[in-house]
Image (cartoon, rainbow, N blue to C red):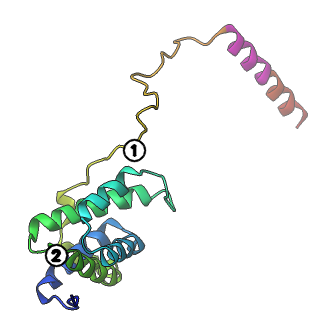
């Protein structure tokens, strides 16, 4: 079966997604990765793939922002799927994501245009807990913090204070 290469009805969703992700400061590489995945596996469910990706947490991340980018991409794609239910196949998602990645630099340079198309201040992505193995111990509460320092801690502090005072006298 030959894949369709153009989807005129999907231009609006591509622009909306690009505008939203640009306002979040999203890295276009993650959007391109999602587009490549959907192009490679058109029968795959984008929502399931993004869910697995989000639950990886910091695993396989290239920066401190990767986890946030994954959560924002998942939230944006969920909103887009609800707003445009006509996007069904993997080919269509690949097309929308691919064009959104290409349009993002335009919207990053024109944030006012992006805000008109998709005002992101009306929603925030929900925080997802990273994946945790079932056999990992989970702390229910934080340990008690003593209200007063121990005598040993006071002794160490006084020794450090004396050393500091001697150093300052010599300077």
Residue 25, percent across and down? Answer: 36, 68
Residue ID at (34%, 71%)? 34
- The crowding category of the residue bearing disc 2, from other C-alpha atoms within 10 Å (few below 14, some 14 to 19, many at least 20), is some
Q: In the rendered view of the protein, which quadrant contains the C terminus?
A: top right
Which residue position is annotated with label 1?
Answer: 131
Instruction: From this view, report whether residue 1 is shown above or below residue 123.
Output: below
Q: Quadrant of the N terminus?
A: bottom left
* Residue that appears at 22% across and 65% down: 77
Tag 1 secondary structure: loop
Which residue is label 2 attached to?
Answer: 117
Q: Main secondary structure of the magenta part?
A: helix
- Quote the CA–CA distance across marks 1 and 2: 34 Å
Q: Nearer the viewer, residue 143 or 137?
A: 137
Residue segment shown in magenta:
151-161
Q: Is residue 61 left or right of residue 107?
A: right
Residue 169: x percent and y percent? 87, 30
- Residue 66, percent from left and from top: 43, 60
């Amino acid at each position: 079966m030959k894949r369709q290469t153009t989807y005129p009805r999907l231009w609006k969703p591509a622009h909306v997604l690009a505008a939203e992700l640009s306002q979040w400061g999203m890295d276009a590489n993650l959007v391109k990765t999602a587009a490549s995945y959907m192009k490679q596996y058109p029968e795959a469910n984008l929502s399931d793939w993004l869910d697995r990706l989000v639950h990886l947490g910091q695993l396989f991340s290239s920066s401190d922002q990767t986890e946030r980018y994954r959560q924002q991409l998942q939230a944006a794609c969920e909103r887009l799927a609800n707003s445009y239910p006509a996007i069904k196949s993997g080919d269509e998602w690949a097309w929308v994501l691919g064009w959104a990645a290409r349009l993002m630099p335009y919207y990053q340079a024109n944030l006012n245009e992006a805000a008109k198309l998709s005002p992101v201040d009306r929603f925030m992505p929900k925080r997802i807990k990273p994946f945790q193995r079932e056999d990992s111990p989970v702390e229910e509460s934080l340990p008690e913090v003593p209200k007063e320092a121990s005598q040993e801690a006071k002794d160490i502090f006084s020794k450090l204070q004396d050393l500091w005072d001697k150093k300052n006298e010599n300077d």
